[in-house]
Amino acid sequence: MDTGGAYSDPVSIWFEKLEFLEEEIARTRLRTIPIAKLLEYLAESEPEMYMLFNLRYVKKMTWVMIEDEMSLDERSCRRIRGMLVSKGARFLNVG
């Protein structure tokens, strides 16, 4: 813990670094846990949306390539994409 004193001994520096890393890990978990739960839900309940998420955000494919891969027309792909965004917003408490 930083008390404002200018500690320079190695143990104090190590504890400050450890505390900083633990805070960073906690912040990262706050962001990743809802996304992991969303992906779990999609994998179990909405396989089409899960596949779309995987193709777009993991494999970084373009929308045209996704339409071909999933054998969808543009309108259907856009509809599934909209539902994915809506579900994602609910899981992240955004909308």
Image (tube, grey):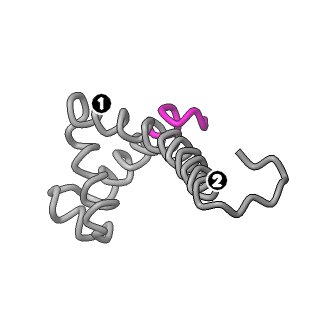
Q: Is residue 87 left or right of residue 41?
A: right
Q: Which residues are magenta?
A: 88-95
Q: Camera-side residue: 18 or 38?
A: 18
Q: Report the Cα–Cα distance between label 2 and label 1.
A: 43 Å
92 inside magenta stretch: yes
Residue 10 lies, in percent from the top left, at: 59, 61
As displayed, is residue 42 above or below residue 63?
Answer: above
Query: Residue 76: x percent and y percent?
Result: 30, 50
Name which residue lies at 50% across and 46% down: 25
Q: Is residue 18 left or right of residue 38?
A: right
Task: Give the residue type that dot 1 points to.
Answer: Tyr
Residue 6: image x %, image y %?
80, 60
* Residue sitting at the far front: 9
Dot 1: few (<14), some (14–19), or many (≥20) neighbours within 10 Å?
some
Residue 63, picture quadrant = bottom left
Which residue: 26% across, 44% down? 50
The vertical placement of 11 against 68, above or below, is above
Q: Secondary structure at mark 2?
A: helix
Query: Any mark on residue 12, and which?
Result: 2
The residue labelled by disc 1 is 41
Asked if the stretch drawn in magenta spans residue 33, the answer is no
Q: Where residue 77 sits: x, y (%)?
A: 31, 53
**Nearer-N-terminus badge (2/1):** 2
91 or 66, which lies in front? 91
Front residue of 74 and 13:
13
Name the disc covering residue 77, or none: none
The secondary element bearing badge 1 is classed as: helix
Out of 8 and 4, give the one closest to the viewer.
8
Determine the residue positioned at 39% across, 43% down: 84
